[in-house]
Image (spheres, grey):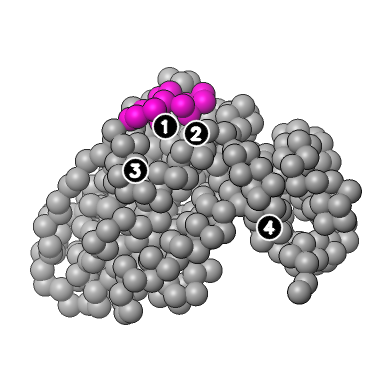
Amino acid sequence: MPDPLDQTRQCVFCGLCLPHCPTYALHEDEAESPRGRIALMQALQEARLTADDPALARHLDRCLGCGRCEAMCPSRVPYLSLLDTARNMQQQARPRRLPHAARALLQATRTPARLRLAAAGTRLLRRLPGHPRLLDVLSRRDRVVPERRPETEEPVWLFADCMSGLLEDERLPAARTLLQALGHAVRLPSGPSCCGALHQHAGLPQAAADWQRRNARAYGTSGPVLSLASGCARQLATDPELGPRHQAITAFVAEHPHLDRLRFRPLEASVLVHTPCTDPNGEAATALLARIPGLNVRPLPMAHGCCGAGGLNLITEPEQGAALRAPLLDAVRESGATWLVSSNIGCALHLADGLREADIPCTVLHPLVLLARQLEPANPTAC
């Protein structure tokens, strides 16, 4: 049986990945680069390091899992898969190696009752280091959006990610409003669902596989499955059951054959578009927002290439996250934008927290929320 870390040998240590790595740009440390982490994985494979080595943990844990190195690697090194494998080896060596808050969050996403407790602002959320204001935006609110008629298109499934019941936001209602305006009946699973990305990247592949099996049962056998969160989108793309039916909702709406039927109210304002590392559909969000008359749509300059919230780093590496976020906050302040849109839940929370701390008057939204707010009521299928 091949060693799961054998593919580290594909790396020729050319260093072309270094300029694309946020943590290397921030720390200027070889061990905080993809090349350095590959070397550490090789040392682990060759037993020159043990899976519970503190240095190995420090440098692998700081990796954001953004995938920028993998996207440009000329040797096609499957870096993200190797990182997951190494973290799984670490997890087996030290099952309680993650901070308590991170372990509690991972467990909560697997247990609906605990997820509801987390939504109420329990000890789990209060233990998020450096992020007390996240409590201000994490609570449960169930909203009912009436069905739109006529339904002339294929029914679609909305992937109700594990945070859908926690966030006091408008993501699901906004998505339903737009999809129904396009003629679709919208389906939601009867129980909780989670893509498993947090578990996969924390070294818990079995937990991620468990969610894959549960999702396969929950989302039927036909109809598109549309994800709202970019992290879910990247995870679901690799799902053997849902992957072939999955599409990010921004891309689905942007490519819809009847998109021109929708009309949007003018809005004289400015919006910055944050493109998460996990979102290959950033252009789709920009194109959709450009349909709102009068709206000035601009990309958010990304500085180091990542906001610092990747994976569990929002919880486990708050200082690194704040340092990577700082130039983005400066860019928002200088822009004078009214809104900042992001399709990633962790990024949105991280950026919103920073904007509040810096007293910058800019609201973070999912791009579909702004679209749904401006959807022209005169449209026969709109609210």
Element assignment for label 3: helix
Q: Amino acid at mark 4?
A: Thr
User: What segment carries the magenta color?
Assistant: 121-135
Residue, disc 2: 101
- Write down the residue under mark 4: 85
Disc 4 is placed on an element classified as helix
Crowding near the residue tagged with mark 1, few <14, some 14–19, many ≥20 C-alpha atoms within 10 Å = many
Q: Is residue 240 above or below residue 276?
A: below
Query: Mark 1 highlights which residue?
Result: 124
Q: How dense is the environment of label 2, judged by Cα within 10 Å: few (below 14), some, or many (20 and up)? A: some
- The kind of residue tagged 2 is Ala
The C terminus, quarter of image: bottom left
Q: Amino acid at mark 3?
A: Leu
In reply to whether residue 129 is colored magenta, the answer given is yes
Total labels drawn: 4
Is 138 left or right of 21, judged from the image as shown? left
